[in-house]
Image: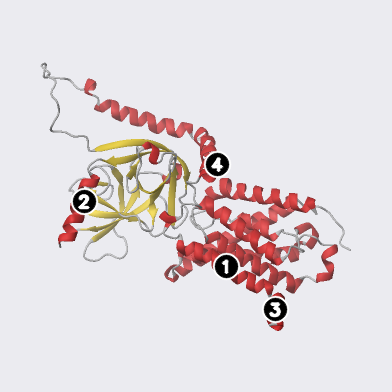
Amino acid sequence: MRNLLIFITKYNAFFLFIIFEVSALIIYIKYNSFQKASFVNSSNAVTGGLYAKMSELNSYIRLSDVNDSLAKENMRLRNQLKSSFYADTVTKHQVSDTVYKRQYEYIVARVINNSTNRFNNYITINRGSMQGIAKGMGVICNLGVVGKVVFVSAHFSVIQSLLHKDSQFSAMLANNKEIGTIEWGDELNPHKGVLKNVSNNALPKIGEAVVTSGYSLFPEGIPIGKISNLHTKAGGYALNMEVTLAVDFTKLQYVDVVDNKFAKEQEGLEAQQKKDE
Amino acid sequence: MSRTIIINLLRFIIVVFIQVFLLKNINLYNLSTPYFYILFILLLPFEVPNILLFVLAFLLGITIDAFYDTPGLHAAACVLLAFVRILFISITVQKEGFDNEPEPTLSIMGFRWFFTYTAILTVIHHFFLFNLEFFNLSAIEFTLSRVLLSSSFTVLLILISGLIFFKRKERK
């Protein structure tokens, strides 16, 4: 027994190393499924608060870029205004609209933490469950698709960005509506994605727009990017192509969280169908 | 003694701030990301007890993890770094010299020793970190090139910081 104690004290560095290393690895493996890690991540009060302060400073520095993009968006929206069209029907009557029911609602939020240079990238925003954000909602910005919400606290949420190994969204070619799946490319380049599993008779062209299909969390037709290269590696039964992403993730400032009012109903129905099979 | 504690506490806060708010945004060609915060562990005094060294390394790692959203990843790499530090110092430095050389800084230990020390420890830390993060042998060349380029970036930053705080001091 005494010899054992002497042995342990002599090589204490090694035993301490084993203890600490194992506990660190346990934390890493246990909380690797990110959603569970509620106590050490950037949506907790301390780090979230610090990031919020820092992002205030950052957003001041980037004001001109944001102004630019807001001005562009204003222009686009103004072009869609009724007042900019010539109205050829004179009579108007008020009807209670039973044909259109509001399906998507948008919650605007500011990005307070963002990364683009790792294998799995996450974005933290300054809105949480208090403002109506829930897990699984889609996130877009004025330029295109950003990602989906994976973790929500009272005042902050964490978004799994499109730049993530596990991110996959349903997409389609804008012109001929061929469906595919958009993923992040292999080279860790924050500006490049890959559109996979497009059927062979799609005939895509370089420069063609890729938009959301409406099958997943997003409304139909939200831009994702433009096709930049048709000859990507690992082809097969289906076409794969490289896409230049519309969103510049390195400069993300404001995002809109998409609240799909019918998502629950759809999920419930699909779950029921799976159970019946 | 209390001066050492205050200096190291300040150093802890400063390296975390630099890492999280400045270096986190730096990324050269998707290959080179510096992890400068390991400077804190490198510069702890020689006399620090092993248990305290491991606790501090673990704390530093978990703090960085909290900001990087990767619980346990940096902590594991830092603990390994602490262990390698103990081995390296026990091989290269005689125990009797501790009175004259309280901290392994560039100005006290000289360029050759400090460079070897930094380079070896940084490469081991980065190698472990990147492989644990990606956890996939299929892209090993890519990971290795990231390790090498990031390590050289980190070593460069650490040497620069050593030169900025260079105090001319005679070795007995």
Instruction: Give the residue type that dot 1 points to.
Output: Glu
Residue A196 percent across, percent down from the top left: 27, 58
Task: Look at mark 3 in the image and give the residue it sits on.
Answer: A5
Residue B53 percent across, percent down from the top left: 68, 62
Is A26 on the left-hand or right-hand side of A1?
left
Instruction: Give the residue type that dot 3 points to.
Output: Leu
User: What is the C-alpha distance between the residues marked 2 and 4?
Assistant: 39 Å
Residue occupying the point 44% across, 58% down: A119
Which of marks 1 and 4 precedes in the sequence? 1
Camera-side mark, 2 or 3: 3
Along the line of sight, which residue is nearer the eye, A134 or B46?
A134
User: What is the C-alpha distance between the residues marked 3 and 4?
Assistant: 45 Å
Camera-side mark, 1 or 2: 2
**Dots 3 and 1 on the same chain:** yes
Above or below, B55 relative to A5:
above
The numbered dot on residue A50 is 4
Residue A157 percent across, percent down from the top left: 42, 44
**Dots 2 and 3 on the same chain:** yes
Q: Is the C terminus of chain A in the top left, top right, bottom left or bottom right quadrant? A: bottom left
The numbered dot on residue A167 is none
Task: Look at mark 1 in the image and give the residue it sits on.
Answer: A21
Q: Are marks 2 and 3 in contact (CB under 8 Å)?
A: no
